[in-house]
Amino acid sequence: MSDVVPAEAERLLTSEPVIAHLATCVDDRPHVAPVWYHYADGVVEVLTTGRKLANVRANPRVAISIQKDVAGRTEWMVSLKGTATVVEDEAAMRAATRRINSKYGADGEAWSENTLVRIDVGSATYRTY
């Protein structure tokens, strides 16, 4: 368990395959995009490319918002802020790809052109409704 992320928030983050929204920064403006993710012990893994990856390389400070809705009603939300690191290790990339894709029911090697980004969570808030 993470010292930063409350146990209930960790339970929510690992409970089911919901979409996260990754916020990065470009030209001092926010850029937000949906991503699949894997969470374990204070670290979020995402696979990305393009603008999100370029933004992380330029400025590693990021935020992630995860929310579960049913029929338009929010059941819970978790908001995380942290520091991202681009991981260039091929074995780590393959392992993360399998973890993330299996969570969402996709082929373990799908979207292998993406790059692994690990986010060390610095702060977390959550709420259930």
Image (tube, grey):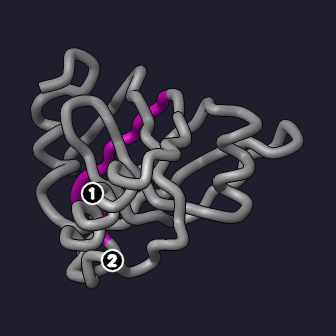
**Residue at the spot x=31%, y=56% of the render?**
96
Whether residue 116 appears in this view of the structure is yes
* Label whose residue precedes the other's in the sequence (2 or 1): 1
| Residue 67 seen in render | no
Q: Residues within 10 Å of mark 1 (few under 14, many from 20)?
A: few
Describe residue 60's horizontal placement relative to residue 90 as left or right: right
Where residue 25 sits in the image (x, y, percent)? 73, 42
Highlighted magenta segment, given as a residue range: 73-82
Reading the image, the residue beneath label 2 is: 109
Q: Residue at x 22, y 59 (%)?
A: 75
Between residue 82 and residue 126, name the one nearer to us.
82
Residue 34: give x, y in percent of width and height: 51, 65
Q: CA distance from mark 2 to mark 1?
A: 9 Å
Vertical arrangement, residue 89 with respect to residue 35, above or below:
above
Q: Residue furthest front?
A: 90
Residue type marked 2: Glu
In the figure, 17 relative to 77: above or below?
Answer: below
Q: Is residue 75 magenta?
A: yes
Does dot 1 land on a helix, a strand or a loop?
Answer: helix
* Image point (46%, 60%), residue name: 47
Q: Amino acid at mark 1?
A: Ala
The mark found on residue 32 in the picture is none
Mark 2 secondary-structure assignment: loop
Q: Position of residue 100 (x, y in %)?
A: 28, 63
Residue ranking furthest to the top? 3
Residue at x 11%, y 26% (from the top left corner) = 1
Residue 125 is a magenta residue: no
Residue 95 shows which numbered tag?
A: 1
Magenta region, main secondary structure? strand
On the image, the x and y values in percent for residue 62 come to: 57, 37
